[in-house]
Image: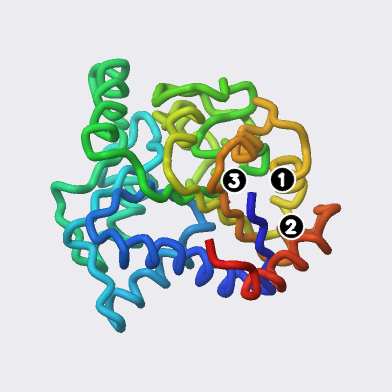
Amino acid sequence: MEVVVLPTYAEMSKAAAQIVADVLNTKPNAVLGMATGSTPLGLYQELVRMHREEGLDFTQVTTFNLDEYVGLRPNHSQSYHYFMQENFFKHVNMAAGNIYIPSGTTSNYRSFCEWYERRIQECGGIDVQILGIGSDGHIAFNEPGSSLSSRTRLKTLAQSTIEDNARFFERKEDVPIYAITMGVGTILEARTLVLCASGQNKAAAVAAMVEGPVTSMNTASALQLHPEARVFLDESAAGHLKMREYYDWVKKMKPGAPKV
Ligand code: PGA
């Protein structure tokens, strides 16, 4: 796992966006795994800037989102369909037919989830998966206790997640209780993982992910099993890391390392 700490949220977002841009520059028809939430907003803004100012092209790109709330229609202002449209898709040149987001309103969740997994495979698998982390250590909506080999499925949200996400809804009662989410096993199959975390309220979960045991109690810790996991943090999210000096040393020495 590569751990890169940057002084600010903006610098963290730029560094993570550069990984995605590098993939697109070598593979214009790459498959991207997309995340929602406050954290990836800066990363999306940077990709949009690169699209406008540097011609970063999305015409051949396919995207798969990690998750969606059950019960919210795509035009609901808190649905992840709406989030993606407003914060990313409408600002770049993606083909609408190449966008996949789990359905929050299907009549058959089991068969939808099976189809979603199949579609990822048929599109060649995910090249780079963008991730955030919950204050309970979740990736996507894989709450504590989720199997580390889980696949796309219906999941009951943890109370702490409902409380964390209540800030986006008028009332806490309005936060959906269920979600469709890619599984930890699905996420681990992506070729590269890029996880961003910002803010002090993530510091404990981040330390457990990077330096704790691999455990379903912090599903982000499964990144330790992935050969290309890259973690980008701002100062406050890195606040509880014990090996901080080593991560900074590796970052400093990286430019001089033999090319592989
Ligand atoms: P946030 O959510 O980016 O809104 O903090 C992250 C997550 O729950 O995965």
Q: Are marks 3 and 1 in contact (CB under 8 Å)?
A: no
Residue at image coords 42%, 22%:
154
Residue 13: x percent and y percent? 52, 67
The amino acid type, in three-letter code, at marker 1 is Val
Between the residue at mark 3 and the residue at mark 2, the CA separation in whole angstroms equals 12 Å
Residue at image coords 36%, 53%:
83
Residue 226: x percent and y percent? 56, 39
Front in this rendered view, residue 144 or 86: 144
The amino acid type, in three-letter code, at marker 2 is Gln
Q: In this view, does 109 lie above or below 37?
A: above
Secondary structure beneath dot 3 equals loop
Q: Which of marks 1 and 2 is nearer the N terminus?
A: 2
Q: Is mark 3 within 8 Å of ligand 1?
A: yes
Label 1: few (<14), some or many (≥20) within 10 Å?
A: many
Mark identifier at residue 200: 2
Between the residue at mark 3 and the residue at mark 1, the CA separation in whole angstroms equals 12 Å
The amino acid type, in three-letter code, at marker 3 is Ile
Q: Is residue 219 above or below residue 242?
A: above
Between the residue at mark 1 and the residue at mark 2, the CA separation in whole angstroms equals 16 Å
Secondary structure beneath dot 2 equals helix
Indicate which label's residue lies in the foreground, 3 or 2: 3
Residue 12: x percent and y percent? 58, 68
Side of 52 where 11 appears, left or right: right
Label 2: few (<14), some or many (≥20) within 10 Å?
A: some
Q: What residue is pinned by disc 3? A: 133
Side of 157 where 145 appears, left or right: right
Mark identifier at residue 113: none
Q: Is residue 251 above or below residue 191?
A: below
Q: What residue is pinned by disc 1? A: 210
Secondary structure beneath dot 1 equals helix
Q: Earlier in the sequence, mark 3 or mark 1?
A: 3
